[in-house]
Image (cartoon, grey):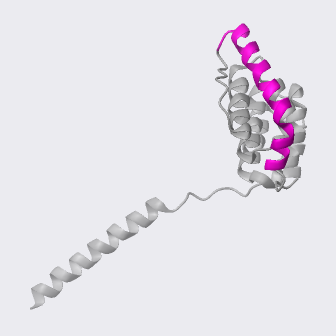
Amino acid sequence: MKREHLYYSIIGVGLMVIVGIIIWSVLPEPTEPLATPEVLTQQLNSDAPTDQKVKAAQDFIRHGEAARTEVRAALVNHQSHEPEVVAPLVQATMKNRDHRSMPTLLDLLEHEDPQVRGRAGAAIQKILGADFGYRANASEAERAKIIALIKQDYQNSTARINEFYKDQRE
């Protein structure tokens, strides 16, 4: 009788350890507090080192739709940022499906950095819901043909895009 209680106790403790390990592995890692979009904008426009600006741009992705306006404004000024900063800004635009950023995204299809071009192409694909076959590493001539096609499609469908995204907050 005593042995059965001992066995059950060992099994119970073992199960509790297993459940604890499973819960511990599933719980998200604690994250540092997220700065407000206004603070992130100040960091982007400051003389901070590039790695801090990249982190601020990546934090915009975590903010999601709450930072849509700030991301759009930062993306419009993409010439003043390094490509490492512009790429996460484009990713934040893609996550938010910010159709108002389309003119800037179309410009970024011709950016010098292939990572920025690729993310701009992916964002346009997600916003418009169509794959035009744009490849960031294609030759300039091939990219120019596809960019012209994308711009034409965007011009033809602007009214439908605005109607589709009409419920999108500013």
Reply yes or no: does residue 109 show up in magenta: no
Q: Nearer the viewer, residue 157 or 64?
A: 157
Question: Residue 66, image x and y in percent?
Answer: 81, 55
Instruction: Point out the residue furthest to the bottom here.
Output: 1
Q: Nearer the viewer, residue 64 or 40?
A: 64
Question: Residue 49, image x and y in percent?
Answer: 80, 33
Reply yes or no: does residue 142 show up in magenta: yes
How many numbered dots are placed on residues in this image?
0
Question: Residue 97, image x and y in percent?
Answer: 75, 44
Q: Nearer the viewer, residue 163 or 29?
A: 163
Kindly indicate the quadrant of the structure image that contains residue 44: top right
Q: Which residues are magenta?
A: 138-164
Residue at 90% x, 40% y is 73
Kindly indicate the quadrant of the structure image that contains residue 148: top right
Work out whether residue 18 can be spotted.
Answer: yes
Left or right of 130, for residue 77: right
Residue at 22% x, 77% y is 10
Question: Residue 11, image x and y in percent?
Answer: 22, 76
